[in-house]
Amino acid sequence: MEITGRIKQIIDERIKKIDSLRKEGINPYSHKFEGDRDHSLDIKNEYSSLREEEYGGEVRVAGRVMTKRGMGKISFIGLQDLRGNIQVVFQKGVTPEDALSLFKKVDTGDIIGLSGKVFKTRRGEISVMAENLAILTKAILPLPDKFHGIKDEDERLRKRYLDIIMNEDVKDIFVKKRMYHKAMRDFLERKGFLEVETPVLENSAGGAAATPFATHHNALDLDVYLRISVGELWQKKLLVAGYEKTFEIGRIFRNEGMDAEHLQDYTSMEFYWGYADYRMGMELVEEMYKEVANSVLEKLDFEVNGHHVDLGIEWKEYDYEKTIEEKTGINIYSTSKEDIMKFLDSKKIDYDEAVDKWRMVDLLWKFCRRQITGPGFLTGQPVEIAPLAKRKEEDSRKVEQFQVIMAGSEVGNGYSELNDPIDQEERFKKQRELKEGGDSEAMDHDKGFVEALRYGMPPACGFGVSERFFGFLMGRPLRECVAFPLMRPEFEVEKNEKDSNKS
């Protein structure tokens, strides 16, 4: 970052204050703030009944200076901590002189600690009358302008710590995100599921249709992949081993595009439920989504992508074949690849001509899906696009799969797990043919998993949901809901800008 003009002047002034503090024997980067601390919100709640200009008990607070202003013999600091903000008052004749002297060296952005008595101002604001002061961390760079903040979107995400400092609503996102995962974990544990851990590095990329990240394992001299699912094949091996209910909340990685609903690395949850089928899974998932939404939002309805979603209404079921035919006039089983391409062209939908018919059929479904608010479940998917799901007994062209549909998107995917090793072997072979034909999302042929199935896996339902559901609850793009999304390094951005200016 190039520092010029007013910013450089501010930095120089603050460095002089740091030198001055050190000469006075004050460490501007303290080791600790001793004693118990009181948080702003707790103080305001405890002393809300004070009358104007009435004093309460003594408190100890610490946090970041967000504002600083003086009015002659009285000065004010707006102090921000984890739970909010509180006003601190420095008044000549009340606040000791040594604290008033140190106050002059405080700047916005500094982290300070102090103690004093709580009181209510004439305007009714709960405040702290400072009795002593400690500078715990001296900030050299100034905070962004409170009213304008960081304008550049990429810079805001790259310097997310500033975004969180300046915006309480952003800070709240990550408090709620912890509630989101906790609610999911608590729900599943209450239902008897065992939380497990499975490998992040795998010999083959399995468990989903996605392009993996590849790397090399030096110790084993082996090419490996970062997982694209939360241990789907591993968790099913645990069902073979005798565990009946497992789940994992963990990071997955997909080397694909970025948009409002997709990132390359993010957290997902997957569960596997022995002796259950997809219908039982649908009931459990609906219950879980409602509980999670209530925990995060304290309600069941929210706005996202121009849709008003209410999880409290009756969840509908959307048949894959019928929905596509109703909205496009195309029957997926009797149509040709060429006819699908004509439709996609008419809607200006991009596609890869090299992929097979069924990849294009899925593009038809995604076109239809955007028109559905939900909530509900998509069922009846073709076997060609679900290589790990069990076929329907009444229609072998389709599988026992369900996807959570809301706000024009898929927000969770599950199915009755395929436990027939012969059928699974044949489907893996088909996936290998697709991969050899250029389909980068086709699954690898996992012989170890097929061998495990040959020992016998009970009938089961598996389900996975990513952070997309949390993003929907927040009504924000997915990368807004990740504390530190992957960004181009700042030096690369600056270099590209210079190269562009030269050309």
Image (cartoon, rainbow, N blue to C red):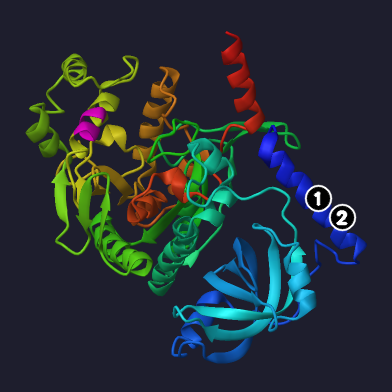
User: Which element is circle 2 on?
Assistant: helix
Q: Quadrant of residue 275?
A: bottom left
The residue lying at 32 percent from left, 70 percent from top is 298
Tell me if label 2 and label 1 are in contact, CB under 8 Å.
yes
Counting other residues with Cα less than 10 Å from the Cα at mark 1, is it few (<14), some (14-19), or many (20 or more)? Answer: some
Magenta span covers which residues? 363-367
Residue identified by numbered label 2 = 19
Residue 77 within the magenta-colored segment of the rendering:
no
Q: Is residue 205 visible?
A: no
**Amino acid type, mark 1:** Ile
Count of number-bearing discs: 2
Query: Distance from label 2 to label 1 (Cα)?
Result: 6 Å
Residue 206 % position (x, y):
47, 39
Q: Quadrant of the C terminus?
A: top right
Task: Kindly report the secondary structure that dominates the magenta region of the rendered protein.
Answer: helix
Residue situated in front as seen by the camera: 79 or 318: 79
Residue 200 % position (x, y):
58, 46
Counting other residues with Cα less than 10 Å from the Cα at mark 2, is it few (<14), some (14-19), or many (20 or more)? Answer: some
Residue 366 within the magenta-colored segment of the rendering:
yes
Residue 495 is tagged as: none
User: Which element is circle 1 on?
Assistant: helix
Residue situated in front as seen by the camera: 38 or 425: 38
The residue lying at 29 percent from left, 44 percent from top is 410
Residue 15 is tagged as: 1
Residue 205 % position (x, y):
51, 36
Relative to 348, residue 79 above or below = below
The residue lying at 69 percent from left, 32 percent from top is 2
Q: Is residue 373 visible?
A: yes
Residue situated in front as seen by the camera: 53 or 366: 53
